Image (cartoon, rainbow, N blue to C red):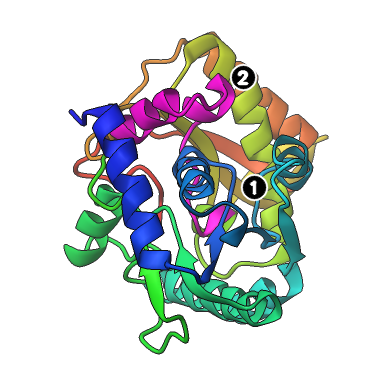
Amino acid sequence: MVNVLKFIDRAVKQIRDTAGQDKVVMALSGGVDSSVCAALATRAIGNQLVPIYVDTGLMRKGETDRIRSLFADANLRVVDAADEFFEALAGITDPEEKRKAIGEKFIRIFEREAKRTGATMLLQGTIYPDRIESEGGIKSHHNVGGMPLDIEFKGIIEPLADLYKDEVRDVAGGLGLPVEIQHRMPFPGPGLAVRVLGEVTKEKIAIVREANAIVEECLVEKYQPWQCFAALIGLGTGVKGDVRLHGWIVAVRAVGSRDGMTADPLPLPYDTLARMATRITAEIPGVARVVYDVTPKPPATIEYE
């Protein structure tokens, strides 16, 4: 396990030494990784830091408003780029190509914002499992294997690159970050795009966003999973109002884990599963059925893409 105080001192020095007098843009998503990076960088370089939240249109329900509220005092720049991301994803069905399209779009947006603010460096919350999975060919994380090779930044600063998720949470505690941030569930950098199998469209994202919100409402407080979510995995037949429906199949995933490298499905009670299925199919018109994924990691990954 990481020595929190020594790590904080070392990371602050790393950021300060690497940045020098340059301005630094950073990707602030509101998750624990980027929030820890923001806290470290604020200590290290103060007003040289330009935190940016990119609303990709692929975020959870209410996420952008929540981020605005949480970081109201952080001089946060919010970039509305939903149309850009949907355009970049149009026609793409391969999971790796999706991640690369999203990774490239992120970089181009941060390059654009850097020019506007005079920044020359990029800070991001890459952690060790991101590197392992990208370099090992499991999946290309948007901030590692999904990044384009031609990048205009003078340098990229990744102070958390050798930490596992549980270690990042320990550092968050050492920095005095709110418990809500310290223990928040992981959310993939590419957002809900990797919870829609096949081509990403606004209609599909709207459906999976509502389903995901229902899953979190039903599970987070009562069962405290390491991660839980809904994914749109295909089309199937159903019946609503005595009428045959050719609608979407939603898969629910809820797992326990320590660091995300391995995970086990939560043994949820049947009445909880039934309640979620009833809500999802009743409240989201286009959904025909709901299934619960009981596959551990490995052999499965936690996310579907």
Element marked by disc 2: helix
Residue at 49% x, 55% y is 189
- Specify whether 144 is left or right of 78: left
Q: Horizontal and vertical percent for residue 295?
A: 29, 35
Q: Horizontal and vertical percent for residue 67?
A: 70, 42
Q: Which residue is mark 1?
A: 208
Q: Is residue 24 above or below residue 163?
A: below
The amino acid type, in three-letter code, at marker 2 is Cys
**Residue 1, image quadrant:** top left
Res. 49 visible in picture: no
Q: Which residue range is magenta in the image?
A: 165-191
Instruction: Report, in whole angstroms, how far the alpha carbon at label 1 lies from the one at label 2.
Output: 15 Å
Mark 1 Cα-neighbour bin, 10 Å: few <14, some 14–19, many ≥20: many
Return the residue found at the far front: 21
Q: Which residue is mark 2?
A: 218
Residue at 31% x, 55% y is 14
Q: Is residue 221 above or below residue 21?
A: above
- Specify whether 84 is left or right of 199: right
Q: Is residue 174 above or below residue 223?
A: below
